[in-house]
Image (spheres, helix red, strand yellow):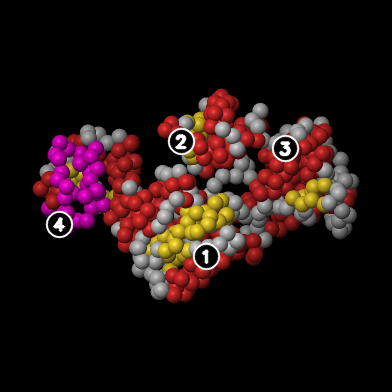
Amino acid sequence: MLNERQLAVLEHLENQPLTLAELARRAGVSTRTLLRDVDYLNLTLSGKARITTGNGLCQLEIFDRGSYFRLLQRHDNDDRLLAELLLNAVTTRRGLAEALNLPETWIADKLARLKQRYAKRFTIAARPGAGYFIAEPEVKRVLILASLLKKDPGLLALRSHFPAADEAVVLAEYPDIHGDYLGCVIQAVYALRHQLEAPLPIRVSDALVSCVKGMGLSLRPPALQTLTAILEMLQSRARKVTPQRIAALLEKVRDNHPPAIIDATLIDNLTGHLLRCAATPVWLTESRQHSLNPLKTAWPAAFDMSIRFIALLRDQLDVPVFDSDLIGLYFACSLERHQTERQPVILLSDQNAIATINKMAIEREVLNCRVVIARSLSDVHELMLTLSPVCVINNSHFRPDDSLKNCVTLKNMIAPAGIAQIKDAVETAFIRHNLTRLFPAQGSFHYANTPSQHWGEIIKAVCRQLSATGLISHDEAVRLCEREQEGENLIVNQLAIPHCWSDDRAAFCGYFITLNHPVIINHEPVAHMLIACASATARQELKIFSFVASVMHRYPAQRIAALAGYDDFMALMQA
């Protein structure tokens, strides 16, 4: 059984690699103890994942994500603790400790972690002299327990010989509620039947009564009425999710964000996904929470659109969708569909057969790439008079001179590793050639924040200073502050990246700001910030966010926190 410290080590490494010293500091142990934990973790993970410790850096590599998270769930007591909180109107820490057979001191730590983990979804409260409880309406408590049963069907059976359904339940009057979820809702109502309040009179169908009896359960009329009301509410919510309404919401989102294609494919994908969210809301994550920063940095515009879209769904359709849902990926598809411009790449090769095969492989694997073959160095120089290639691939015996910039040397048939190298060169060539223009020294400064200043005050003060010097407009300053208040702020290895999109700006521009004191945002430490204003029309510059993230993740957090100013930041970017 993994202890709390070992589970925390895995959680830290899921987000990013860390040095041995930093990981030991976060775990509160010596490096020797940490290395013993790593050995035990690798033994327990048994091929599903592995922690490597080369060059003093700890890195978690997950080989089978599904099996990995299922294994962690067997070692994690959070679900059992949450079940006890739901099944009891109020319970003390001692009562929780006895039910879970854990020390009372562990329960206190687990409760604090559980509050943080589900802060956006429901509230765990405490009543002085009484104990802890889930401070949510009756219907929501039932659905949370149903989500818990969906994750672990045997949870209640282990607790009190609770009968579990062997197969999915089907009711024609609730066509949008999946059978597995419907069975979990029935079980949740049965488990909480003694806590339910007297409902308003409502007709209970004979089919539902027969279904409950068929599961081996017995519910009195008030509990059946509550069950009916919950199912009717879910089905009613699902009926509101129509392609027409989704299309209307998409248009509202597009008004405040970069242009995106809204077509039938996007609408159908979103409608189907949201229909499931409305009819079968999953209030608990299927696996442990992980960082959303990779999605934010890979698709910043898509993620911002998803935040706005989710807010509209909650407000207008009452659909419980969370930031961790994959809405952003649909937007990412819509943002990328119109990027048909193919960037030229020169392939220097003196062997016809190999050149042809490599050209086909590159164009197949590297999106938006057009390969032009050159047979000699003179051909390369002639082509560069009419082309502006993102890179030159030397696939020959020739030795290019220093005048050829961004040249990648790959011999013979290009292997998958070579394709990956070409992808990186194509995606980052524009950025590497324009770093000083994209991140100008003018506008980068030190902001002497006080330890008591919260993030909202800091971002407003920094935006005022940039706006006063004309580096950003008043509208951009307002958008930056509004975006930082929406939640899910973009933070990469202690670097906060407040950003906005502007129709008036011709190109991307980023200003590096150092802070006097670190700030905690969304439970993450922030040492400095990069204010980014992106053009809504310069599509090739969307890769800048991913480039910044890849550079920042190469270094330990202490290196990022120790940046003294603009010159240090640019030295990292140009390395």
Whether residue 475 is visible:
yes
N-terminal label among 3 and 2: 2
Which mark's residue is nearer the viewer, 2 or 4? 2
For marks 3 and 1 on the same chain, the one whose residue lies earlier in the sequence:
3
Check whether the beta carbons of the residues at disc 1 and disc 4 lie within 8 A of each other. Answer: no
**Label 1: which residue?**
459
Q: Nearer the viewer, mark 1 or mark 4?
A: 1
Report the amino acid beneath label 4. Answer: Leu
In the rendered image, residue 144 lying in the magenta stretch gets the answer no
Rendering coords of residue 478 (x, y %): 51, 71
Q: Magenta part of the protein: which range?
A: 382-410
Image-quadrant location for residue 340: bottom left
Under circle 4, the secondary element is: helix
Most foreground residue, 36 or 214:
36
In the picture, measured across the screen, residue 457 lies left or right of residue 342, that is right
**Secondary structure at numbered mark 1:** helix
Q: Earlier in the sequence, mark 1 or mark 4?
A: 4
The residue identified by callout 3 is 106
220 relative to 229 in the view: left or right? right
Callouts 1 and 2 close, C-beta under 8 Å: no
Disc 4 designates what residue?
Answer: 385
Where is residue 401? Give x, y as percent: 14, 45
Query: Which is more toward the observer, 321 or 216?
Result: 321
Seen at 47% across and 75% down, the residue is 474
Which numbered dot is residue 57?
A: 2
* Quadrant (top left/top right/bottom left/bottom right) for the N terminus: top right
Q: Amino acid at mark 1?
A: Ile
Residue type, label 2: Leu
In terms of secondary structure, where does tag 3 sit? helix
* Residue type, numbered disc 3: Trp
Cα separation between marks 3 and 2: 29 Å
